[in-house]
Image: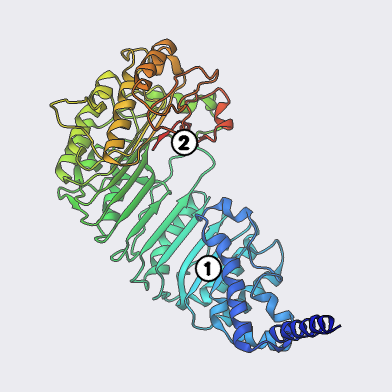
Amino acid sequence: MEESDAESDLSISEDGSEQEDTCHISKLPAETLMSIFVACVRLHNARWEAQSPSPESWRSDGAMSERSPPLVFLAVCRQWRKLAMGNPALWSTLRARPRLENLNDIAMMSRWLQFADQQPLTIQLSSGCDWEMADLAVDVLMEHQAQWFRIELFWEIDDDAPLFAHAFAPAQHAPLLQTFRIFTTLDLESKDAVDAQLGKLLSGSPDLQAFEWSHSITYMSYARPIHLPDVPFSNLRHLKLGARMVFSCCIEIMRRMPLLETCDLLNVWDGYADHDHTTTSALHLQHLHSLCIKTDGDMSDFLDELVLPALRRIEVVFRLYNPNPNEEDWSAYEERLHEFDPWPHAEFLSFLQRSACPLEELDLVTSVSAAELLQYLPVVSSTLHTLCLRGKLGWTCVDHHALSLLTILPGGSRDVVCPNLHTIRLDDCIVAGELPVGSMADMVQSRLIYAAASQRPLMIYLAAIRLAQAICTEQALGRKTQDITSRASPLTPIAIDCRGKLGKALPLAKNTHIVPRGTGMEKRTGGKVCGDETMHSLHSYQF
């Protein structure tokens, strides 16, 4: 009986303790409620802040609605409404996409930004396809320009430019603005209007540090290049231009950016004579460490003007843009080799030597030849850690000479070329049918052994359309891997082709697949086909 009473007392004590630890939400202290509000808003914003800004990201949830925080807090009770309205930081981030003919969305945007008061504003606005609603949304944004901090605008209308600045209006000012991104699909006249307006829109933003203008058109056209007059670029660190550009205009724009660190020029051509801004003075950018160029034009003069002593990464892609669907046989447009100018070997080599930069990543999707590649590797040998060579349109640049240069001979007297390599990607760029028996396996084996001895990570990606021609015969590779595995312990499967008969083992290798493109195996091995028909992450040897 006494034991039963003790258990009862213990139960009552536990119930009382539980009641003391809980509290009805209406009785929570204001500080606790505010912490909950802040956590909810941060969690909601984190869903899209982690995404790279692109039109595709707008297909996911997260845009402003009556049920999204912090708007939803206003509808619960008087206390919640008062707390939410009294904390401007809750309203400093807005992601909006006005619905068709829905003025309530415009009213919500206006109310939201009024609650933000003087907070620096991060805003993503997608215009939708209703130009009247889009203009109203831009008007709301312009009313709060003094608080702009990070602005991303996705303008989905192709025949009307956003009304950033009227000719009769005074210059606007956004002194806090550090990031401005705009994505458009405008026709030629509307694009030119935006190009002219941006200088007036951003003239009062001296601390602008990141600028992006990505532009796409529905088919190939002779679009005029953009110039971005009067945009204050003196403090810019990051530039990304997907709108149509001319190399000489790129040089002139980059001259206004002495602090530039990363530069992506994604739609460049060599242009006409009336767009030639070439000068005799070289362009020195002391802080630029990453440069990406995608072009279908001659980049010789562009390379001749550059001196980039801090460059650590360069990517050059030869590609065509937006083939005209009305042109006969447009589906084969990308296969027309004559559309590309020759690879500017002498200018590229001179650029590397002149810059004397600590290049760490070399990524080429061009018509560079094997003989030309052999001249680049010694120049960047001491610093290079990533080598990506991707073939397209039948371009090949890796032959037995290149493999021999990359192979580390045990006890050899010559210096190791590129001793710090931790990523090698050879994607459909291997000279088919010309490799000596076992040369690819020799290179892979030597790099794996060297990486293991140096205790450094190593990843090797291989891709080829015809695997037997690109690597070597199946029998030869099997014999070579038998030689390797005689010194390897334990045995680890590293290579399979469609029939699972390629190779047996390499020392300490794992997560390895060799999959020929076009077989369907890439879907089962996690490979991805990029828009320019190159493969990513198909075949890897990794420590």
How many marks can you see? 2
> Looking at the figure, which quarter contains the N terminus?
bottom right
Q: Residue at x 62, y 72 (%)?
A: 40
Q: State the mark number for residue 507.
A: none
Residue 124 x, y percent position in the rendering: 54, 64
Residue that label 2 marks: 537
Identify the residue at horizontal 33%, vertical 64% (top origin).
230
Q: Hey, which residue is sitting farthest left in the picture? A: 413
Tag nearer the camera, 2 or 1? 2
Tell me if I can see residue 268 in this picture.
yes
Q: Are marks 2 and 1 in contact (CB under 8 Å)?
A: no
User: Callout 1, which amino acid?
Assistant: Ile
The residue identified by callout 1 is 123
Task: Please state if 105 lies on the left or on the right of 49 as rendered.
Answer: right
Return the residue found at the far right.
1
Secondary structure found at label 1? strand
Q: Quadrant of the C terminus?
A: top left
Q: Amino acid at mark 2?
A: Ser
For the point 45% across and 37% down, the residue is 321
Choose between 164 and 46: the one closer to the eye: 46
Asked which secondary structure carries label 2, the reply is: loop
Q: Residue 382: image x %, image y %?
A: 19, 40
